[in-house]
């Protein structure tokens, strides 16, 4: 395993090209990531994904970095000019996720899930009790989970079939969710359920705050190729107070999409962190490993690989920075986010694949850094909008905004 320079998350960048606050955040996140990586590297091979997740969460909590995923108005960090107090700064999240992912996926996951699962409260509730729970998230005292996906509703959330029926002062939720990150560790869930209409209809969905310990709620974990807490959520007549509706009844789809719109671009940042670590591992290995009497780094074909890895990664970082700045500025950044998410996640898989190839047999040995990175990157092309969905979004934008031949300009 190679060690990286202290400015690894922005390696190759001009530090003056970003606000000083972001450089400081990268440095803080990198320090936390180093601690998580070191503790997990020294842990028993039998350490489970839940225990590993808690290692990442504990270090983030101790360093107060989790405050960044909650708006300042609800107990989160004041990020100055990066974002108003009512929301979170996407540029700050991007800076942290790239730095944390460079070190270890569990540090990155524990960071982003605190925001992804709790931000619907900031978007949709003025209830004092729920806002206090949001403050608990910022302090790391509570762990949230976002429960959208069902067996029949993934990329198309209109397929959500979980029902929420009004009964007096409560709603009664019945249904199931799957591929829910933080199952096994979450203290509460933000759940998308149907209050009217039928699966396939966009209207009639509502977001709810649901306690983990609610009667009728149960979970079941399963394993995926990059281990982390994930599984199924079962709701069998779970009663939820009407005060725990998030946003307007029937407007849950808009709230869910607004939540994803704030956090989707950070997936690209995580991908870039994984890819930059893979590049560093390749450089270190090719520089020290000799074949045929000379370092592998002296072979032209492998040098071409490194050049392409570096160029593609830099392009991914620039696309991510552009999209994050646009979202923070309140712009309609649908195309920018889709470009960055598509290119960064696809590129990370390619970069990590090349890194495995450079390491030869050592690259496919379970426990090596590049083997871990290869598995960590794969899911990024699926969750929070598959690559295919991003292409559809971009194609729509291109068809609508590309100038006619002879008019010049840019789409």
Image (tube, rainbow, N blue to C red):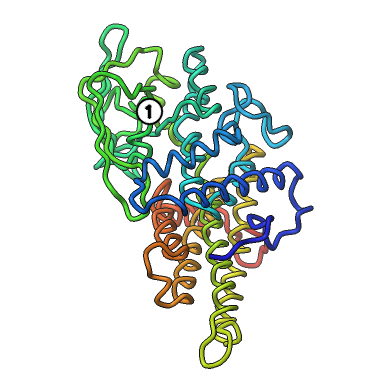
| Residue 144 rendering spot, x and y as whole percentages | 43, 30
Where does residue 167 sit, x and y in percent of width and height? 25, 10
Foreground residue, 257 or 127? 127
Please identify the residue farthest to the left as the structure is shown. Answer: 236
- Give how far across and how far down residue 228 sits, in percent: 37, 46
Q: Position of residue 63 (x, y in %)?
A: 60, 36
Quadrant in which residue 318 is drawn? bottom right
Query: Which residue carries the number 1 mark?
Result: 189
Determine the residue positioned at 48% across, 22% down: 124
Query: Is 279 located above or below residue 296 in the figure?
Result: above
Judge by depth and name the residue closer to the eye, 407 or 186.
186
Name the residue at the bottom extreme.
292
Look at the image and tell me whether residue 258 can be seen.
no
Please tell me which residue lies in front, 234 or 228.
Answer: 228
Name the element at disc 1. Answer: strand
Task: Quadrant for the C terminus, please.
Answer: bottom right
Determine whether, in the image, residue 266 is placed left or right of residue 156.
Answer: right
Residue at point 69%, 56% (across, down)? 7
Name which residue lies at 61% across and 59% down: 403
């Amino acid at each position: 395993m190679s060690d990286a320079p202290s400015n690894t998350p922005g390696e190759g960048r001009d530090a003056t090209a970003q606000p000083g606050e972001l450089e400081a955040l990268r440095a803080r996140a990198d320090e936390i990531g180093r601690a998580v990586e070191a503790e997990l590297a020294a842990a028993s091979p039998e350490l489970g994904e839940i225990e590993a997740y808690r290692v990442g969460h504990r270090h983030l909590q101790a360093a107060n970095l989790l405050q960044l995923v909650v708006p300042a108005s609800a107990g989160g960090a004041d990020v100055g000019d990066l974002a108003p107090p009512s929301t979170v700064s996407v540029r700050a999240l991007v800076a942290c996720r790239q730095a944390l992912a460079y070190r270890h996926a569990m540090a990155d996951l524990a960071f982003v899930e605190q925001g992804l699962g709790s931000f619907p409260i900031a978007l949709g509730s003025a209830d004092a009790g729920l806002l206090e729970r949001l403050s608990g998230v910022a302090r790391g005292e509570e762990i949230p989970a976002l429960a959208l996906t069902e067996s029949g509703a993934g990329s198309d959330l209109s397929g959500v079939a979980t029902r929420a029926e009004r009964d007096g002062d409560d709603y009664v939720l019945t249904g199931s969710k799957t591929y829910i990150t933080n199952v096994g560790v979450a203290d509460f869930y933000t759940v998308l359920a149907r209050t009217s209409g039928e699966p396939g209809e966009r209207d009639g969905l509502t977001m709810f705050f649901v306690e983990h310990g609610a009667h009728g709620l149960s979970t079941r974990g399963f394993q995926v190729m990059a281990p982390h807490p994930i599984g199924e959520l079962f709701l069998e007549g779970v009663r939820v107070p009407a005060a725990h509706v998030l946003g307007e009844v029937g407007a849950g789809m808009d709230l869910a999409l607004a939540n994803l719109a704030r956090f989707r671009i950070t997936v690209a940042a995580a991908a870039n962190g994984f890819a930059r670590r893979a590049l560093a591992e390749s450089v270190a290995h090719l520089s020290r490993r000799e074949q045929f009497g000379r370092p592998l780094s002296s072979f032209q074909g492998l040098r071409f690989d490194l050049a392409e890895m570096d160029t593609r990664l830099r392009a991914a970082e620039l696309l991510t920075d552009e999209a994050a700045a646009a979202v923070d500025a309140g712009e309609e950044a649908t195309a920018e986010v889709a470009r960055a998410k598509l290119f960064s996640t696809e590129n990370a898989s390619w970069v990590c694949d090349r890194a495995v190839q450079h390491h030869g047999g050592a690259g496919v040995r379970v426990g090596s850094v590049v083997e871990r990175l290869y598995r960590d990157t794969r899911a990024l092309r699926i969750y929070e909008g598959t690559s295919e969905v991003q292409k559809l979004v971009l194609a729509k934008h291109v068809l609508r905004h590309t100038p006619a031949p002879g008019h010049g300009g840019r789409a």
